[in-house]
Image: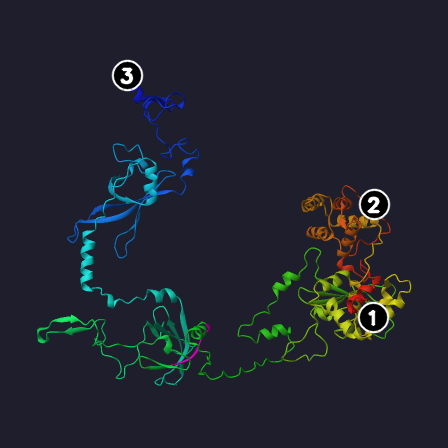
Amino acid sequence: MIGKEKFHKSQHWGYCNNVAMLVGEGKPGIGGEPLPGQKLKSTYSVFPEGMGSDAPAWVAFDKQVLSFDAYFEEEVPDKNQELYRIRHCKIYFYLEDDTIQVIEPQVKNSGITQGTIVRRHRIPLPPPHEDQFYTIDHFNISIEVILYARKYKIIDCDQFTKNFLRKMGVRLNPPTGRPDDPYTKERQKILDSMKPLRPYERIDTLKQFLDHDGHVLRFFCVWDDPESMFHDPRELVLHYYLSDDTIDIKEIIPVNSGRDAVPLFLRRDKLPKYAPTGLYPPGTITSRTVLNVLGKLGHYILDNRKTGAVHQEFYRDSDLKIGAVINVWGRKIILCDCDEFTKEYYRTKYGIEDFTPVPFKAPPPPESEKMLPPYTGFGSEEDSLCSCMGLLPKPPQKDFKKFMEKDRSGMESNILRFLAKLVTDSPIDKDRKFIISYFLSDDTISVFEHTQQNTGILGGKFLERGRIKKPGQELFKSEPSEYFNAQNLFVGARVCFHGHNFFLVDADEYTFSYMEKHANEFSVADIGVILKKLKDITELRSREIRQVFAATDPEHTKVIEYEPFRDLIVSITDGVFSEHEIRTLGRYYSVREEYEMDLHFLLAVAQEQLKKNNFENFEQLSAVLIYNDREKCGVLPHETCRTICKSFKLPLAGDDLRALLTMFEDDRKQVEYKKLVDGLNWRKNQIPAFQTIKDPLKTEDDWRGQPPSFAVKRIKYLPLLDDLFGKEE
C-alpha cells in the first residue's frame, strides 16, 4: 500500500484527446493546489506571481539583466601552432522571462566569426533533465554551465549581479582568474620582439585626429605645364587634411579637352619638401637610426639620440597661402584661391585677413547674341520659333501648371468679364454692347456681342477665342510679339482688338472680387496703392477737401451717394484715376446694404435652375453642412457655406448664390443652413415657377453688364478722409 501511495503521488493519470494516459509530475492536485512534496514549475519566470511584489515578473524585472564573465575551450584540429583556443564571452540572464544570451566580444584581426554565439531564448538543462530550463538558481561564480553541449566556465560577474544574487540568498564563490590563450600570447611575444616600444619613440596623433577629424582646407590651384602642346594652364583643387597633415590633389578636366579623366592628380599622403640637392635616395630616411659600435665586428645598437638621422620636412598648413608656389614632385603649382572654411581657419589661427585671389584665367569672351530669323507669317510665332531651336522641331510648350491652377473649378470660373462699347462716331455702333471675356488659364480673349432687338445687327460671337496682339507692332520681326494680358483690362481702359477700339465700361462682380483678392497682380484693385496715390495728390489740400466732402453732405449723415463721390474724386485728381480705381475706392468704403430681392422669387428661380441640371444631392449637402457645424448650433459662417456649396458644384451663378446665403443669415450674420437646404430642395418643397420668369438666374456666359449684387450706392467718406489725412482733432 505504501508503494502504491508513492506511485500515485509521483505519477498522475490524465486525459489527452479523450484518451487516458500517464502525465508528468507537474500536474497539480484537485483545485490546482500542489500535492504534498510537489514543486510546481514556473511557466515564464523562476519568480511566480505572488512572491515578493504583486507585479508580474515581466513588469517587476523589466530591463534588469544579470551579466557573467565566462570562457570556453575550443579544440583546433590539424594545426601545430595551437591545440586549443580560449574564447572569452559574456552570458546575459534576463530576469523578466529567464532567457539567456551568449555574446563573444569581437577582437580585431582574430579571423574568427564572433558576436552572438547563442541568441536570446530559454535554454533547457542538459540530459537527463532536458524537460526543465535554466533559472537563476543554476548560476554562480566559479561554476560550469553546459549550454547545448558546450561547457562554459563562469569566472566573475558585475556588481549588479553580485548584489542581486546576495539578496536572493545565494552565497557567491570567489572569482577565478581568466586563462590566456597560448597561441595569442606567443604571437604577442613575437610582435613585441619585432618592434619594441620605447617611451621616447612614442608619437601620439590621436589628439590631432579627434580635434580635426573631417576638417579639410581647400585651395584652388593652377599648374602651367610647360611640356603641353598648347601651354594651357591646368586647374587643380588641393585638399589639406588637418587630422593627419596629408594632401591630395584633384584635377578639374574641362569638357572636350582631350585629356584622360583620372581619379586623382596626387593621391592622399604627406607631401615632402624638396631637399637642397633634390630628393633623398631610397633608404636614406628611416624610422630608426642604427649605430655600429664595434666597427668590423658588426655589432649594432639603436641610436637613442638620433644624432645621425636624416629629418625630412613635409608641407604643413603654415606653408600654404594664396600666392604661394609649392613643389609637388617637381611640378610648380600656384595657390590662387580658397574656400570660406579655409579663410576662417587662417583668420583664427594665423590672423591673416588678406585673401585676394590670384587671377589665372582670362576673362571669358562675351557671348555672341543669338540672332533669330524674322517671322515668316506661316503658323504661329511660337511654332516658327521652335523650328529655330534645334534640328528636330518640337511643338511649343504650354504652361500646364498655370492651366491647372486657373482652369474652371466648380463655381470658380477664372474668367474676367467686362462690358464694353465701341469707340466710334457712328450713331448705330455707339449703342452696341460687347462682353469681353479674358481666360486666365491660357491668356486668351473672346468677344461676344449682345443681341438687341430692332437694330439690324446680328449678335453672338464677335471674336473667336485666342490670344490678341497689341496694336502697333511689326508683323515680320525677330522679336516675339506682345499680347494683351490681364493687367491691360480694367474698367475705363481702351483696347484695340484687330482694329476695333473698345472702351471697357463695367465688369461683373466676380471680376471685381478676383482682382481685389489678387491685388498684388492688379494695381487698379490694390486699395493700398490707390490710397498712396491719392494721398500724394491731395496731401497739401486736406482742409479744402474736407470742406468739399462736408458740403456734399449738408445733413451730416456721414455718407454720400456714389455718383457725387465719383465726381468729387475725378475733380480732385484731375482725371488721373481710372474708372476701375474709383470703383475700387468706392467698394472699399461703401455701405453694404441688404438685398432688395424677394426670397420667394429667388428660391423659385434657383429651384428651376437645379431642376434643369438634375441636381438632387440635398441629403449629402445637408450632411456635410451638419458635419462642419462643430458646435451643433444650426448656423455656419457665410464663407463656409459658400465653399461647401461650391464643392457640390451647384449650378448657380456666384452672385446669386451669395444673395441666397445672405437671405438666410441671422442677426449675427450666420447662415441657417437647414432652412437654406430645405428651400433649395425642389423634390420636397417645390415652389411653383412664376410666369414672369422667362430666364433663369444669369449664368457666366449670359452676363449682360447688369449692376453686381453688391452695387455701390452710398459711400462712407469719413473713414476715407481719416486714412488720407489722419483723424481730425
Q: Which mark is residue 569?
A: 1
Q: CA distance from mark 2 to mark 1?
A: 47 Å
Which x, y percent locates residue 719?
80, 64
Q: Say whether residue 581 is left or right of residue 440.
A: right
Is the residue under label 1 in contact with that under label 2 (CB below 8 Å)? Answer: no
Start and end of the magenta stretch? 334-340
Q: CA distance from mark 3 to mark 2?
A: 103 Å
Q: Amino acid at mark 1?
A: Ile
Q: Amino acid at mark 3?
A: Lys
Q: Earlier in the sequence, mark 1 or mark 3?
A: 3
Q: Residue at x 56, y 72 (%)?
A: 393
The mark total stands at 3
Q: Secondary structure at mark 3?
A: helix
Q: Which mark is residue 688?
A: 2
Is residue 485 shown above or below 230? above
Residue at the far left in the pictured view: 297
Which x, y percent locates residue 4?
28, 16
Q: Which mark is residue 419?
A: none
Q: Which mark is residue 4?
A: 3
> For residue 211: magenta?
no
Residue at the far top in the pictured view: 1
Q: Quadrant of the N terminus?
A: top left
Is residue 506 shown above or below 354? above
